[in-house]
Image (spheres, rainbow, N blue to C red):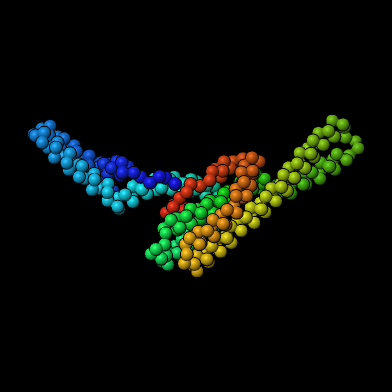
Amino acid sequence: MPAKPGFFDYITAAFNARPWGMFVAPNWIGLGAFGLLGATFDPGFWVLGAGLELGYLLTLATNPRFQRVVAALPRSEAAAGWNQRIQLLVGRLDANDRGLYDLFAQRCRSIIDLQLPHAAPSSDPAALEAQADSLGSLSWMFLRLLVARRTIRQVIGGAEESSDMRARLTALQKQRGDASIGEELRHSLDGQIEIINQRLQQRTDAERKLAYIDAELERIQQQAELIREQAALSTDPELLSRRIDEITGTLDATGQWIRDQQKVYGAMEDLLTEPPRLGPDARARESQ
């Protein structure tokens, strides 16, 4: 997580602060005006401007609300970049898988939303933030699996292609069994038969992997539903945070499996990066 801003960071932010819709910071305009007045009429305006500037910077930099805004900026920028990356990956899915991800992301968000009305005043906000981080990792893993499934399906083709390959293999084996063919043709047919057998074996392996992905997607969905039910009943965010961490901790093997598949199928480099630690506002992608 980004380090907490220091006093100099607040001063710098105050110096450059500008309201929404303004292209130039009002502070710059004020400094320019006093500088022009001092140069044109009386240098005393420079002293007055320096005093007003110092008072302005100290007042704004020590304002708690302004400090919270400054502290949130790095996290907000990271969240915007990460959400853009997620949307690019979602764009690689078909309509059905996009719907699955949107629904799952919404369920993850609802886990936090369910706790907000019932959170005790003494509750540590960091507990909900930790939950949002972990749920963001959970939704990221769900998306990675969807994209991995899509990639494998694109590489191996559909069931009709496998059926055509088996028909071709049968025809080649029958042709090879003809005693009247020459040795050169027989050698060529042997090569084709071997290649098709290898491709069919790859499809068998891919079907096993697709079955694993389907099972993992279902498991993650069921885990999210379990957490959601617990969130509706629990009044202890820290206890629920530990439960969520236990569940996300079981995804290490799944992440390693996805990394292994990248070596085989390629085109999945975007799935290898782990998500940054993001707060509640930057958890799963917002439904459009």
Query: Left or right: where does residue 2 sit relative to residue 33?
Result: right
Question: Which residue is found at the position 16% from the left and 39% from the top?
Answer: 49
In x, y percent, where is residue 245? 54, 56
Residue closest to the far top: 184
Q: Foreground residue, 43 or 160?
A: 43
In x, y percent, where is residue 35? 16, 35
Question: Which residue is found at the position 48% from the left and 46% from the top?
Answer: 276
Report whether residue 150 is seen: no
Question: Which residue is found at the position 22% from the left and 39% from the top?
Answer: 28
Report whether residue 90 is seen: yes
Q: Quadrant of residue 225?
A: bottom right
Question: Which residue is found at the position 60% from the left and 54% from the top?
Answer: 250
User: Image quadrant for the C terminus?
Assistant: bottom left
Residue closest to the far bottom: 233
Number of dots carrying numbers: 0
In x, y percent, where is residue 244? 53, 58
Q: Where 266 falls versus 114 (above or below)?
A: above
In x, y percent, where is residue 227? 53, 62
Q: Where 96 falls versus 228 (above or below)?
A: above
Residue closest to the far right: 179
Q: Foreground residue, 192 or 284?
A: 284
Residue closest to the far front: 122
Q: Where 32 falls versus 245 (above or below)?
A: above
Query: Left or right: where does residue 230 sit relative to residue 72?
Result: right
Q: Foreground residue, 92 or 277?
A: 277
